[in-house]
Image: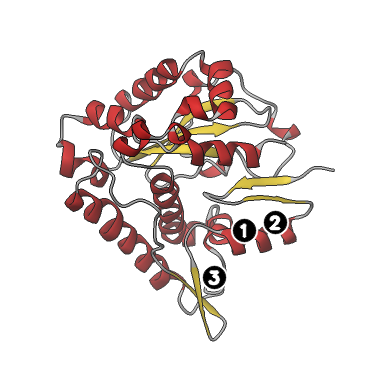
Amino acid sequence: MNFLRIPSAFHGVRCANSQSFFLQCFKSIPSRIQSNHFKCYHTVPEIPERNLNPLFSEHGMKVAWDEHQGHVVKSLNDRVKGTELEDHSMFNIIFQTAVLPEHAATFQFASQAYNNHFFFESLISAEKAKADPKFQLEGNSVIQQAILENFESKEDLLSKIKQLASNTFGAAWIWVVLDDYNRLQVMRTFQAGTPFLWTRSQSNDPHLVPSVPDHSMRPRNYSHVPIFNLCLWDHAYFTDFGLFQREQYIDTWFQSINWSVVENRLKQSLV
């Protein structure tokens, strides 16, 4: 039996059919849903760590999380209010609107809200990361072994991420994803593109993909499974790093990854 799989930012979901898949996604979707007379409205969720120095100052956090996430969630709610999408989960909205030109903006807002939450869920302050081995890569054997097998070292992984970032112009996301063959890959999506769908990956970089799988043989209905991501939108680094220090921002981000969260996502995604 083929299983659909998704590592929501927080709970793994394995289902034998699309109906139960979306039902469970509705329950575990990153942005919490509030029901009002059977209409679902998305809210800005609480994140486990707000003290993310030196990656984000207090003001940087306000801009990158509170204001940006608040804007995209409000814009999404404004778009779906009174439509057939009003009572859908955010993840379902991404899938429902991805190939519909008339819902392009709705897709972008839903996907960006998901991407940004996924990013912040995997962050921790660098001080905490250094103090507790459970947050460090070396304390999480599954993701550590996967990185060694696919990139030889964490330094090599960071180098590939920096290489792709240096060749990126404009707003984008860089993702470490799991492919159909349980290999880790580095890929990029521009704007609010999602790695879940081939049609909306929005610029997969072929230079960092070792081989191209036969898409007709894919065992699931979506593309790659994201494990963790890097935000290359201006709001993420302009406040604290300025216009010309994006590489420093990337180095600081890599030191602020909560590898325990990444480990759990990977474990829940392997089949």
Residue position for label 3 = 85
Q: Going from the N terminus, do you reach mark 1 or mark 3 first?
A: 1
The answer to which of 137 and 162 lies nearer the viewer is 137
Amino acid found under the numbered disc labelled 1 = Cys
Q: Distance between the residues labelled 1 and 3?
A: 15 Å
Name the outermost residue toward the bottom. Answer: 37
The residue at 60%/28% (across/down) is: 142
Residue position for label 2 = 21
Which quarter of the rendering shows the N terminus? top right
Expressed as whole percent of the image width and height from the top left, the position of residue 109 reads 40, 58
Residue position for label 1 = 25
- SS of the residue under disc 1: helix
Q: How far apart are marks 1 and 2 (CA)?
A: 6 Å
Q: Nearer the viewer, mark 3 or mark 2?
A: 2
251 to 82, vertically: above or below: above
The answer to which of 251 and 163 lies nearer the viewer is 251
Amino acid found under the numbered disc labelled 2 = Phe
Visible residue check, residue 182? yes
The residue at 41%/45% (across/down) is: 119
Q: In which quarter of the image is residue 143?
A: top right
Amino acid found under the numbered disc labelled 3 = Leu
Marks 1/2 in contact by CB < 8 Å: the verdict is: yes
77 to 4, vertically: above or below: below
Expressed as whole percent of the image width and height from the top left, the position of residue 79 reads 42, 70
